Amino acid sequence: MTILVEKHSGYRQITLNRPDRLNALTAEMGGALLAALGEAERDPGCRVILLTGAGRGFCAGQDLTEVMPTEVGPPDLGLLLDGYNAVIRKLRVLPMPVVCAVNGVAAGAGANLALACDIVLAAKSASFIQAFAKIGLIPDVGGTWALPRLVGAARARALAILAEPLPATRAAEWGLIWQVVDDDRLMPEAQALAARLAAQATIGIALTKRALDAAETNTLDAQLDLERDLQNEAARTPDYAEGVRAFVEKRPPVFTGRR
Ligand code: T3D
């Protein structure tokens, strides 16, 4: 199985599982990951996804043995990328938070897969490599979109063109990811975060994701209208009523994540 799914209370942990290849992606694996995300979305008990990798790496990007040019010509990378892009699109629109625990090197499409998640934690020993330039490709699966937004134009360009490893600590300092954690604390911290998020107001978080993504292209005027509409939607959830009641009654809220 190239993708492992563990069901926990309130969340699913999805593990990329080709550790002998540093979890390099294959077309089959992309399909399995998309299917796992779809199944999680359909499970009303699942309110968070935790994505990580098996073994010493998070994901070394495309499995290069699957895309070797032959005498006939280059492989159709567009077809392959349509599959991976579906995963990126799904991560962005999933109506729940996605936590990524980067347990080791994240290279090429593997780095940009991590960056498509909502909250990225990384082990201190992990690194991020926009490895594409080393093989004559461009940063894909959303890399050219995410990098300048996360770290600014100058750093995005250097990361993409130089293809040098960015240590996790610097990635956090630069705002590429949320937090760095000691290696042996990564999974306990990531699982605790997933469990904590699973008890929060899931629909409010889903609407927040929508608003932040829309803000990437909206004018302030359009964004103000969108915030008004999404806030009205959030205010109609039982979790909003519970949140306000709990505040007034000076007790912790009990959110259901339901409409
Ligand atoms: O092509 C398309 O359009 C589709 C989309 C492409 C987007 C991309 O992702 S392009 C970028 C592809 N990825 C890379 O170029 C990274 C290649 N890997 C590396 O540069 C290094 O492996 C790392 C820097 C990530 C890690 O280095 P290190 O020294 O820690 O590990 P290693 O010894 O290189 O790798 C361990 C094994 O995994 C090794 O196999 P072996 O020798 O033990 O049998 C290595 O060949 C294998 N491996 C690592 N990355 C890939 C891979 N096998 C296939 N594809 C890989 N990408």
Image: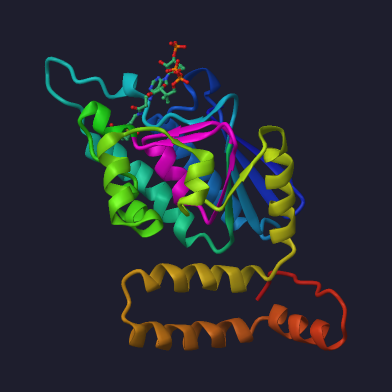
Where is 169 relative to 68, above or below?
below
Looking at the rendering, which quadrant does residue 242 occupy?
Answer: bottom right
Question: Do we see residue 141 in this rendering?
Answer: yes
Quadrant where the image shows the N terminus: top right
Which range is magenta? 103-130
Looking at the image, the residue that sits furthest to the top is: 71
Give the colour scheme shown.
rainbow
Quadrant where the image shows the C terminus: bottom right
**Residue 71 among magenta residues:** no
Q: Nearer the viewer, residue 48 or 188?
A: 188
Q: Nearer the viewer, residue 203 or 114?
A: 114
Residue occupying the point 64% across, 68% down: 202
Residue occupying the point 62% across, 86% down: 235
Where is 20 relative to 103, above or below?
above
Image-based side of 192 in relation to 135, left or right: right
Image-based side of 157 in relation to 200, left or right: left
Q: Nearer the viewer, residue 21 or 259?
A: 21
Q: Nearer the viewer, residue 57 or 163?
A: 163
Residue occupying the point 48% across, 34% down: 127
Where is 180 relative to 208, above or below?
above
Residue 105 coordinates in the image, percent (x, y): 49, 31
Q: How many marks?
A: 0
Residue occupying the point 59% across, 36% down: 124
- Ligand 1, seen in the image, is in the quarter at top left
Question: Do we see residue 139 in this rendering?
Answer: no
**Residue 106 among magenta residues:** yes
Residue 100 coordinates in the image, percent (x, y): 57, 46
Image-based side of 90 in relation to 155, left or right: right
Residue 253 coordinates in the image, percent (x, y): 80, 75
